[in-house]
Image (spheres, helix red, strand yellow):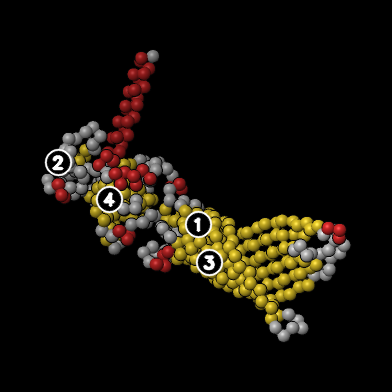
Amino acid sequence: MGIKKSLLSKMILGLLGFQILNSSLWALEIDEKLTTRFLKISRTKKTILLNRGLEDGLVVGDHAKFFLTAGVIARGVVVKASPTRSIWSIYRIIDDSSMYPDRVVNIKITRPLETTEDPSRSLYDNSNSTMTAGTEVMTMRGDSAPARVRTMDDLSAEDQRELGAMGSLDQEAYSISGVNTERTIEAFGLIQFSSLSTSVDEGGEGDYTGGDSTIDFSIGVEKYFNSPQSFLGKMSFFGIIHSGNYTTTSIQGSQVTSSVFEYGIGAHYHFGGSPLSYNKFIPFAGGSIGIGSVSDDVQVLTANSTTPSSTEEGTSSFISVAAGLKYFTRAGFGARVLIDYYQRSETYEIENSDENFAKTVAGPRILLGLAYRF
């Protein structure tokens, strides 16, 4: 039994040694470049999660410049790495407006910044110069002088909290929130539904049944904009088609069925992060306006008979003010819930009458819907 345990321990140590040797052999050299993507960025933009890791040649302690065609936007160091992910501590930000989730950037491996004895210029807390077992030590590429780099323990309390919010490095990108700038068109549907029955007892005159139901359905197409640094990037504009059918029965025996078909346009403003985000809730507010056609069908019900219906047709206009939440997956599927205040004005031209009749329908609604971005 002892021999087996010893052999197992040697095999584990051998595998660990091979992994370390393999990482060292494949480590990126100075000035080597790599295309990568920001998976997640902390609120302060001092801690970022990249979709590149040990398999791509990145190791803890690597320093790099982050750059676009316009120039360098930041500089940082790897503080934690897994085969497919790496967490970076950003110690110099040049263009924070270019740093946002799902942004594709290039990195270039560089030498670490020059060391200094001036505490005011230090990139880490040097109040305790005693190096503990948890301290990461690396040799500067091309230099034999050792230098301590920022490790998990060197991060500030705020950075530690933001880092913890990023979750496991091995977590798949589909479970990490980000921004998909390629999906800017969305098709959606909304529904409000109820189906109730009514029963009226007229005492000695008998009783009758009716209905009290609502079927409210809307479909639309919404357009977003990939302009993260402008006001337009927070906006979206949509076209909508709305159809509704409402039935109610009064105690006097009148059953009114109203139908409406409308179309209009609207806009949403999104709060917090980008409206193109996925795997996170997106709060929004906005409104819509439109026009359409309506009809009112009135039928008198009694215990013994039903009179023929009388139908009046007219035109309508509506306005809606809403607030709610959207949620989308990286694959583009999503859902939304919203509360709106809806007001519809209806105008009817009655035969054999010199005046038009007007009707106003108004009140709050709760709508649920599904959507897909493509």
Q: Is residue 320 left or right of residue 133?
A: right
Measure the C-alpha gap from mark 4 to mark 1: 32 Å
> Do callouts 4 and 3 mark residues in contact (Cβ within 8 Å)?
no
Q: Residue at x 63, y 62 (%)?
A: 217
Question: Residue 117, how many percent across, how many down?
Answer: 12, 45
The crowding category of the residue bearing disc 2, from other C-alpha atoms within 10 Å (few below 14, some 14 to 19, many at least 20), is few
Q: Residue at x 71, y 56 (%)?
A: 196
Which is in the foreground here, disc 4 or disc 1? 1
- Write down the residue under mark 1: 325
Please tell me which of labels 2 and 1 falls first in the chain: 2
Circle on res. 90: 4
Residue 346 position (above or below residue 8): below
Please tell me which of labels 2 and 3 falls first in the chain: 2
- Tag 4: residue type? Ile
Residue 80 position (above or below residue 250): above
- Write down the residue under mark 2: 145
- Tag 3: residue type? Val
> Do callouts 2 and 3 mark residues in contact (Cβ within 8 Å)?
no
Measure the C-alpha gap from mark 2 to mark 1: 54 Å
Farthest residue, direction left: 117
Q: Quadrant of the N terminus?
A: top left
- Tag 2: residue type? Ala
Farthest residue, direction top: 1
Q: Residue at x 46, y 52 (%)?
A: 280
- Write down the residue under mark 3: 321
Question: Residue 233, how many percent across, how many down?
Answer: 41, 65
Question: Residue 72, how many percent across, how many down?
Answer: 26, 58
Which is in the foreground here, disc 1 or disc 3? 3
> Do callouts 2 and 4 mark residues in contact (Cβ within 8 Å)?
no
